[in-house]
Amino acid sequence: MSDRSSEEELLEFLYACPVGLIECDSSGAIAMMNPHAMQHLLPLAGPRDPGNLFAALEHHAPELRSIVAAYAPATGRICDGHRIFVDLAARRRTTTPKVLACTLVKLGPDRLMATLSDISEQVAQEARLRQADTWFATLLDSVSHYAALTITPSGEIQSADACFARQTGHAAVDVIGRHLAEIGGSEPSGGDLRLDEQLLIAAREGWHLQEGWQQRADGERYWCQRLVVARSERGEPRASGFSVILRDVPRRGEAAEDMRRLLNHDHLTGAANRRHFGEVLKREQRHWRELRQSLSLIVLDLDHFKAVNDTHGHPVGDTLLRRVTDVCTALLPPCGIFARLGGEEFGVLLPRYDEDQAAALAEAMRAAIAGIAVDTPRGGLHVTASLGCATLNETDGSIDALLALADDRLYAAKHAGRNRVRSRETATA
């Protein structure tokens, strides 16, 4: 029989466990956590309450509180390996962004157990495998699965094979001389490059590969990989035309689309989540380096939102966050991304928007938010927001500097009295 007490053995287990363990109540108040959990949680809490799980993770995983609130059974697994993306952008391009996996188990009506583990390398490996899988599929699939055509430097179709007709529903003879962008009905949403921008990169780099929605002749949408390869006459330095390969990727069914939405969107509001926002921001940074097209960022923070939760409760606060998302996304251009970055903070990414366009949109969002009214037992509730605008040109292409500059202007708006927009023009006025 062991001379040690069960309590000593339990403490030894908690200290030695390579996974962060946290016990808390349904409001997030922590009763116990091991050192490994402290190593993960304390750096993320910042000025927030490190003694409350939801408060500590509010900036990085604001959806956890609503996920727990929505779980009705008395006991059971609430979520398994829910991913928390800590960094919007790595401080150095060689740095792997940190990702935590969180599992929550409901042990009783007011008792939760949470685990936290670092899966950063696993996520990076998954991304590498997905990229490799795309290329291997391209090499191994039959050539008959691809539509092949040639286009002029300006995008007019010169020739198309029989597979093009089968894939798109357009007869090859009917599309000769027409512009490829008109035939494909491509949608440059979410910051995808337009055809002329793809041709520019392919002419410079030799090729360009992009995925996006295309449209068949009958109006059906399908997910398509488009490879553009530059062609040039012997001895000519400039591209004399392009070969284009279109591949119908049958992976975007309804179930796959639902999964994509779960991975890319905030559980509570339906806005894009922090992870997806960071991915699009990195992609747009690459586009900025290649094309120097405008890229603007708006960050907005609701004024005095903590008082809303304290006075009216989190359900009313959640309703308000959803209303803010609704009115802002209604104003969003097709290529824009509206994301919940944490708590009451949101980000708006605007490819091809210059600083004047971004400032005008920010002002429209400010006015729309100020017009929201939520009915509560205490009467009508109104809220305002402070907003900061910045462009990637101002930071010479640095994501970290872009985020910091937009944040600085956001807090300048708060210090100036809240319910206002600050951009480069107003900051220097």
Image (cartoon, rainbow, N blue to C red):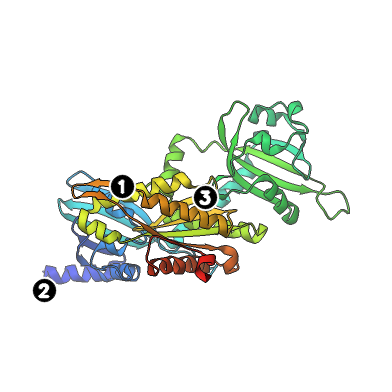
Image spot of residue 34 (x, y percent): 24, 68
Image disc number at residue 373: 1
Nearest the camera: 261 or 311? 311
Kind of residue sitting beneath label 3: Gly
Q: Which quadrant would the N terminus be assigned to in this image? A: bottom left
Q: Closer to us: mark 3 or mark 1?
A: 1
Classify mark 3: helix, strand or loop: loop
Kind of residue sitting beneath label 1: Ala
* Location of mark 2 (residue): 3
Please give left or right for residue 402 compared with residue 61 in the image: right
Classify mark 1: helix, strand or loop: loop
Q: Earlier in the sequence, mark 3 or mark 1?
A: 3
Q: Is residue 246 above or below residue 277?
A: above
Please give left or right for residue 205 compared with residue 270 in the image: right
Nearest the camera: 292 or 225? 292
Classify mark 2: helix, strand or loop: loop
Asked if one can make out residue 16 in the rendered structure from this viewpoint, the answer is yes
Q: Earlier in the sequence, mark 1 or mark 2?
A: 2
Q: Quadrant of residue 56?
A: bottom left
